[in-house]
Amino acid sequence: MKRKQPNQFNIWDDPMQFSLDGNTHVLGYKAATMAESLSGVRDTMRTALRQVWMRVGDQDDYHNFDSPHDAGYILGDILSVTGQPDRTPVRHGVYGIAIAAYQDMDYVSLYWGDKNAEPLAELTDTDLEAFESGIAEGATN
């Protein structure tokens, strides 16, 4: 039997099963641990690089938020302070919504963007539900 060198390791020690896209694969424990670690780093970096950006009307600056809910909370607070009763957002183009006094060309910009506020993606329907929930909470506080 061949002896292992001190710095060598076998990635197939203790095989581990995992599922990816509905297919089952077998991966050595050490390789699986490394892959899991790299996946976590990738997800953390993706989350850190992607932020929700919102600008309320033409006179506002762009502000970044961690989530659609957080952005909605601030908008709900703004709408309650200004006495806007209608708090139901409607999509306005790809990267915006129309709500209460913010309509037509004076809409609310709202999208996923990078650290420089460059658009990366529109909000999904699930994101908009979280945004609406934030509006409701912000309007009551």
Image: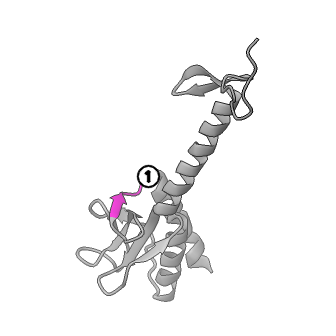
Which quadrant of the figure has residue 25?
Answer: top right
Which one is nearer the viewer's eye here, 60 or 11? 11
Would you say 104 lies left or right of 89 here?
A: left
Q: Is residue 135 visible?
A: no
Residue 6 percent coordinates (x, y): 74, 33
Q: Which quadrant is home to the N terminus? A: top right
Would you say 14 lies left or right of 66 here?
A: right
Seen at 55% across and 64% down, the residue is: 133
Seen at 45% across and 59% down, the residue is: 128
Q: Which quadrant is home to the C terminus? A: bottom right
Which quadrant of the figure has residue 15?
Answer: top right
Seen at 55% across and 70% down, the residue is: 70
Residue 32 percent coordinates (x, y): 65, 32
Q: Find out whether residue 70 is within the magenta segment.
A: no
* Amino acid at the residue labelled 1: Asp
Residue that numbered label 1 is attached to: 125
Which one is nearer the viewer's eye here, 16 or 94? 16
Would you say 2 lies left or right of 101 here?
A: right
Residue 126 percent coordinates (x, y): 49, 52
Above or below residue 28? Residue 68 is below
Above or below residue 9? Residue 95 is below
Above or below residue 35? Residue 129 is below
Which quadrant of the figure has residue 33?
Answer: top right
What's drawn in magenta, residue-wise?
A: 119-125
Label 1: how many residues lie within 10 Å, few (<14), some (14-19) or many (20+)? few
Q: Is residue 2 visible?
A: yes
Looking at this view, name the residue that lies furthest to the top: 1
- Colouring method of the image: one colour
Q: Find out whether residue 122 is within the magenta segment.
A: yes
- Secondary structure category for the residue under label 1: helix
Above or below residue 80? Residue 38 is above
Looking at this view, name the residue that lies furthest to the left: 105
